[in-house]
Amino acid sequence: MNLTLPLAVTGRATLAALAAVGRVALFALQTVTHLLRPPFYWKEFLSSLMQVGYFSLPVVGMTAFFTGGALALQIYSGGARFNAESVVPSIVAIGMARELGPVLGGLMVAARVASSIAAEIGTMKVTEQIDALVTLSTNPMKYLTVPRVLAATLAVPVLVGVGDAIGIFGGYVVGVNRLGFNSAAYLKNTADFLQTWDVGSGMIKGAVFGFIVAVMGCYYGMNSDRGAQGVGRATKSAVVAASVMILASNYLLTELFFTS
Amino acid sequence: MISLTDVHKAFGANRVLQGVNLTIPTGESMVIIGGSGTGKSVLLKCVLGLVTPDSGSIAVDGVDVTQTDRDTFLARFGMLFQGGALFDSLSVWQNVAFRLLRGPKKLPKAQAREVAIEKLRRVGLKPEVADLFPAELSGGMQKRVGLARAIAAEPEIIFFDEPTTGLDPIMSGVINELIREIVVEMGVTAMTITHDMTSVRAIADKVAMLHGGLIRWTGPVAEMDAATDPYLDQFIHGRAHGPIEAVR
């Protein structure tokens, strides 16, 4: 057996991974530069805003509601070990606003939006609709990518904000009805401990996650292989890549926002 | 005039075009024939800049296609894609008027719709079709809508990629007739790629045969049957035996 083979395999895999990162980074950079130059397709932007924002609201809302409720139960049972049950309202609010709202909202949007963007653009690619756009003097980056990326970057922070409120409400419902908290005291506790930056940092995370989701969907769609299998692979890759990048960037943003 | 000089294109080890030389005079209808996978679509996409050749040059009216403003260059072209390539999310009239609703020559919506309906009529479709979506149309109707989109902005050059693939013989005949009529009526330069010999005889002024990455034969359609080139002879008569290897 060739002893250098494992080294060669590792090297090839590393180079391929770095090349993929470079291609995605260049694609994102291209998107930003196209965003700053006309023409801008408003109709496509508004349509994307509806798709990404409005139609994601039910799934993000439901996720947030149940997460807030479960969080209240966990903090209550965990806090009971050292007589700290009273922290439930504040921890639910801070936990939802800083972490769970943006991360779970981002992941739900990744599952719903990155997959749909990748499948739509991938299908357009394999049916020559992207080539048709080019022959009709329309830049696919401007027509397909820019409106979707801008819409997701603007819509996901709003979704996160709404998700935070619904998540906190979920905690309140469980806290008051299941754990016996006084309604007014729960609300006062929530309001007293929650700071503007808790919500603001979560919404900034949401903007970053929205950008990641749309860029990944567009990138994998534009680079889809031929046939149904190619589109399926592009869709799967877009969701996986977007989810991993959301979790990785969440860590980096948390380091940046809360440890300095 | 479109001229291709020594155009090469390879995808990995697969050398698709190996020095293509071809001239299409202004106002002529050139049909490129050849078996599946011989690079006909790649050749067409090279002219449009959808695929970049590895070497060689392509010029339209003497101007190298890589040296010209892309939007101005593409504004001279119309293209009918093999599968129609209609945009699913847009209605039929919005597909046809796509170029008229955007860009420097943008028309008001109502006027663009009128032009689209006129073009739909030109390809034999009723105005009621205008508000349907591509998924609601049959294959033949989709081709017609694709044709209407190709001619909507009155281009000087039209490309047809396998215009009759997937259609029944009668619908193929209708599309062939439409293409011929439109090409003559508009006086455009046309480049069609096909392996349907009925289309060739209906559409072509001149024929070029692509095989093995090279143009094997080119000449007027009237001389095609009398040509002695063994590749052309085997292809136009659909013989299983000859210099072109047939995979069984």
Image (tube, coloured by chain):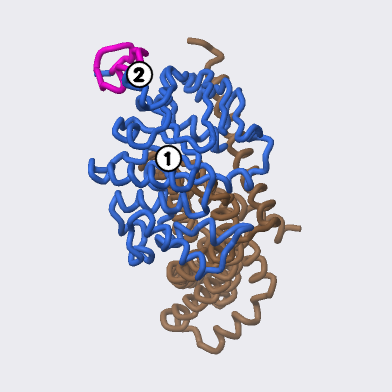
Chain colours: A brown, B blue
Magenta region: which residues? B227-246
- Separation (CA) of disc 2 from disc 1: 21 Å
Q: Which mark is residue A218?
A: none
Q: Which residue is mark 2?
A: B232
- Determine the residue positioned at 26% across, 22% down: B238
Q: What residue appears at the point 28 percent right and 18 percent down from the top-left corner?
A: B247
**SS assignment at label 2:** helix
| Along the line of sight, the residue nearer the viewer: A155 or B22 | B22
Where is A132 relative to A105, above or below? Answer: above
What is the magenta segment's predominant secondary structure? loop
x, y percent for residue B134: 36, 57
Is residue A208 visible in the rendered image? The answer is yes
Evaluate whether residue A220 shows in this view: no
Q: Give the mark, 2 or 1, whose residue is nearer the N terminus.
A: 1
x, y (%) of residue B119?
A: 42, 58
Residue B121 quadrant: bottom left
Look at the image and say whether residue B134 sits in the magenta stretch: no
User: Which of A113 and A253 lies nearest the eye of the viewer?
Assistant: A113
Q: Quadrant of the N terminus of chain B?
A: top right
- Residue B160, numbered label: 1
Looking at the image, which residue is at 54% across and 44% down?
B156
In the image, taking residue A145 as reference, residue A63 lies left or right, namely left
Q: Is residue B137 above or below residue B217?
A: below
